[in-house]
Image: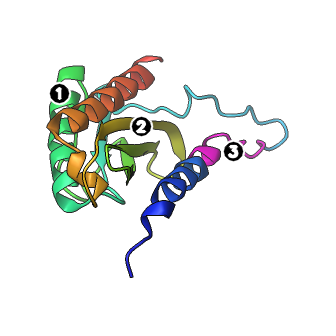
Amino acid sequence: MPFPKSLRLPAAIAFTLGLAACQGMPEPPAAIGTPAPTAQSLAPVTADGQATFAFEPFTGAPGNIADELSRALGSEARSQGLVLVRRVGAPSTYRVNGYLSASGEPSSATVFYVFDIVDNTGQRLKRISGTERISGASGDPWQGADSGALNRIASRTTVEMAAWLNRR
């Protein structure tokens, strides 16, 4: 049974708000006498000073959209001086989990995206989120997600990743 059109936008908004709510979660307190970790202490670098990122498979996007976004992220990462690890399961300084959803109306649609940068223990260190308004398509809102929209998502994401990495 298809998901009712009248519930798509509210469901996408609820999904995005649910993910955004996690961003404000407080960190557990440190043990007494132990300094609390700072954002800078949570951002290790490799021995040669070059941090690496491995994107995990995206959740929520159709395969063709995920593939095109992956290519755009790779291109934008190179332009930002970020080093991506391409092999699944290869060691990296950070892993990036991506979550995407789309909701549409007849004349427009919105892609919601969230990228969590995590350390090797799975602890989230940085969340990047946003929306991209796209032309609507009858039926599937992903049909409006063209190369331009995916390139803008990739650009904003990698710019934020580079700014976070270089803030030290």
View extreme (right): residue: 32
CA distance separating discs 3 and 1 = 32 Å
CA distance separating discs 1 and 2 = 23 Å
> At label 3, which amino acid type do we have?
Met
At x 46%, y 45%, the residue is 119
Quarter of the image for residue 134 reads top left
Q: Magenta span covers which residues?
A: 20-30
Reply above or below: 62 against 144: below
View extreme (top): residue: 167
View extreme (bottom): residue: 1
| Residue that numbered label 2 is attached to | 131
At x 23%, y 46%, the residue is 144
| Residue that numbered label 3 is attached to | 25
Residue 10 in percent (x, y) is at 54, 55
Q: Mark 3 or 2 closer to N-term?
A: 3
> At label 1, which amino acid type do we have?
Arg
Q: Mark 3 or 1 closer to N-term?
A: 3
> At label 2, which amino acid type do we have?
Thr
* Residue placed most toward the observer, 157 or 110: 110
Residue 91 in percent (x, y) is at 29, 50
* Residue placed most toward the observer, 137 or 147: 137
- Magenta span: chief secondary structure: loop
